[in-house]
Structures are given as C-alpha cells and as structure tokens.
Image: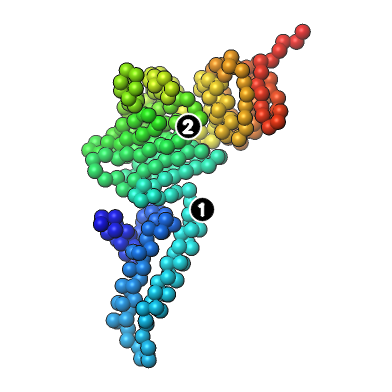
C-alpha cells in the first residue's frame, strides 16, 4: 500500500509540474519499468471526470468509457515513448525501490544520492541504492567497480557501503573504494574524515580497521586478510581527473586493469606478475603507448599474436 501511495503521489506531482530534477529522474525510470501505468491512467481518468463536471458544452453524445480509455492510452504511450528514450540515454535503472547506476568503459558519472551525498563512479562500475533512505541508516552497494564517495554528515543516520565482503561505515566524510570483480583485492582509501572498514566473517572472525586521511585498507578476497597502510590518497582518486595511475601496484593488477579497459588478453609469466610498479598515464593514451612505457621501465618486451599480447623479460644482447 505504501508503494502504491508513493506512485500515486509521484504522478500527481508530475501532472502538477512540481517534481524536482531528481524526482523527475525517478519518475521516468519508473515509467520505463511500467510501474506508473495504473497510477497515470487513474490520474488521467480523474482529470477527465473533473473536466466533464466543469465544462458542459452542447453536444449530442458524451465521452464514452471507450473514448476515455483511448485518450488515457494515448497519454500513457506518449509518456512511455519519452521514458523509453530517456531509458536508452540514461544508465540509471530502477527496480522496485532500488536504483541501479551503471557506467561503461571510458565513462565516469556523478550521482546525487537521496540524502544529498555525491558519488562519482569510475568506468565499468555498478552501484545500487534505495530511491529513498528510510529507517536509521543509509546503505548503498558497490556491486562492481570503483567509486568516490563524498557523504553528507548525519550523526543520527550512519552511512554504509557494502562491497564484495566488506562494509564501510561513515558519518560524514570522503573516501574511495575500488572493488572490481577482475581484481583479487579491495582498496578503501580516505581523503577526508574517518571511516570504519569491516571484513566479512571468515578465518579469524570479523576484523575492523579505522582509517584516517591518507590511510588505506587492503582486503584480499581470497585469503580474507585485511591490513592498513599509509598512502597518498590523491593517487587513489586520480581517475576522477581522467588519469590512469598505478601506485606501487602489482603487475598482475596492472594487467587485469588493462585487459578490462582495452578488451584484450595479456599473458605474462608469474615472475613478471609479481612485479610492483608505479606509473601514470592519460586516459587517452593508447594501449601500445602504455605497453611501450611499461616495457621500457621494467626491462620487458611484448608482442601481439592472435589478438593476444605476450609480455616477457627482455633478453640481454649476446
């Protein structure tokens, strides 16, 4: 019943042209799911009856239920058409009361949450959150990818981010979470304020780490080891400015990131994958340029074969 009343109120405010920009986003997402068909038809029917009661022109036949139904159907189809267009253009999706935001390769997106907090999603990411924060907590899920959170402070309503076996709790702060499915670890980095990161149940039971600015939690999803290190937090959010930055990153992670970004397969012997390196590239740099620089800095060479890249240690000249 509560959801029905919410939908009816949303349609009423749409008809009255009193929806905010954020509420309009929700309206069209719901329309694309067909959630508003009944509420819109009911509202249009009410308008038809109201008009019939106010305006009484001379006529030999009145609107019949069939004609009214056609009018309602036409209005619904018009809004559905607009909704479908926006659906195709907008990566937002709403399932029930849950909003799902998706970014594709090469895309970064700013998202405004219902409480006024801001989230920036990196490419190839997906985040889910409720259309409205209810109860005593605010909770979102970073299903996959990377996101930078700037959370509006509310001491009475803590904010939680769930990401692949970790839960990050804050009251109001700014932090970055990297949690791609193709990487074996999760990184939580604080740029402002304080957060609490807790790993899921596992060997040794739950474990919590408190992070301050320029501190980072590393969580190994295989071993479930969680540890805290000092970092330059600006490096963790370089992606917001369109930079591809590796800060003491394992070559295994570098390879996985490049494979995902450029849709290629990269092979390398295990000894190379264990390397750790730091490097920075522009988001517009091509894969050959990146490979050239990585190879030069790490005494490697690469070759293309059958749509596959092979990295090997550079042989010394005889």
Q: How far from the left and from the top, in percent, is residue 282?
A: 59, 32
Seen as rendered, the residue at the extreme right is 318
The number of numbered badges drawn on the structure is 2
- Residue plotted at (37% across, 61% down): 36
- Residue plotted at (34% across, 30% down): 167
Relative vertical location of residue 159 with respect to residue 87 in this rendering, above or below: above
Q: How is the image coloured?
A: rainbow
- Residue plotted at (30% across, 77% down): 50
Residue 186 quadrant:
top left
Q: How far from the left and from the top, in percent, is residue 60?
A: 37, 91
Q: In the rendered structure, which disc, 2 or 1, sits on the residue that comes first in sequence?
A: 1
Could one spot residue 188 in this view of the protein?
Answer: yes
Viewer-closest of 86 and 271: 271
Relative vertical location of residue 60 with respect to residue 164 in this rendering, above or below: below
Left or right? Give the position of 260 relative to 71: right
Left or right? Give the position of 5 relative to 266: left
Q: How far from the left and from the top, in percent, is residue 192?
A: 36, 30
Q: Mark 2 sits on what residue? A: 180
Viewer-closest of 87 and 289: 87
Q: Quadrant of the C terminus?
A: top right
For mark 2, give the secondary structure.
Answer: loop
Numbered mark located on residue 89 in the image: 1
Could one spot residue 191 in this view of the protein?
Answer: no
For mark 1, give the secondary structure.
Answer: helix
Viewer-closest of 202 and 9: 202
Q: Quadrant of the N terminus?
A: bottom left
Numbered mark located on residue 130 in the image: none
């Amino acid at each position: 019943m509560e959801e029905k009343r919410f939908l009816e109120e949303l349609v009423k405010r749409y008809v009255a042209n009193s929806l905010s920009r954020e509420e309009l986003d929700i309206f069209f997402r719901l329309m694309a799911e067909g959630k508003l068909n009944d509420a819109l038809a009911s509202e249009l029917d009410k308008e038809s009856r109201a008009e019939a009661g106010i305006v009484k022109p001379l006529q030999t036949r009145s609107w019949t239920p069939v004609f009214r139904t056609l009018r309602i159907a036409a209005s619904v189809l018009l809004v559905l058409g607009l909704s479908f267009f926006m659906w195709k253009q907008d990566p937002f999706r709403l399932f029930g009361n849950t909003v799902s935001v998706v970014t594709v390769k090469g895309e970064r997106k700013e998202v405004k949450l219902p409480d006024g907090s801001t989230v920036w999603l990196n490419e190839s990411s997906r985040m889910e959150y409720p259309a409205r924060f209810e109860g005593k907590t605010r909770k979102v899920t970073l299903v996959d990818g990377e996101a930078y959170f700037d959370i509006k402070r509310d001491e009475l309503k803590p904010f939680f981010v769930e990401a692949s076996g970790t839960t990050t709790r804050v009251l109001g702060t700014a932090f970055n979470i990297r949690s791609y499915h193709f990487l074996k670890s999760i990184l939580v980095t604080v740029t402002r304020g304080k957060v609490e990161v807790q790993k899921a149940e596992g060997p040794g039971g739950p474990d919590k780490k408190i992070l301050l600015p320029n501190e980072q939690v590393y969580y190994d999803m295989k071993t479930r080891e969680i540890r805290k290190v000092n970092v330059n937090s600006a490096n963790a959010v370089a992606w917001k400015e369109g930079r591809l930055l590796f800060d003491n990153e394992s070559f295994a992670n570098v390879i996985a990131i490049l494979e995902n970004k450029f849709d290629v397969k990269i092979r390398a012997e295990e000894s190379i994958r264990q390397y750790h390196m730091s490097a920075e590239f522009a988001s517009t740099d091509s894969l050959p340029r990146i490979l050239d620089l990585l190879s030069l800095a790490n005494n490697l060479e690469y070759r293309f074969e059958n749509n596959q890249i092979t990295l090997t240690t550079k042989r010394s000249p005889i």
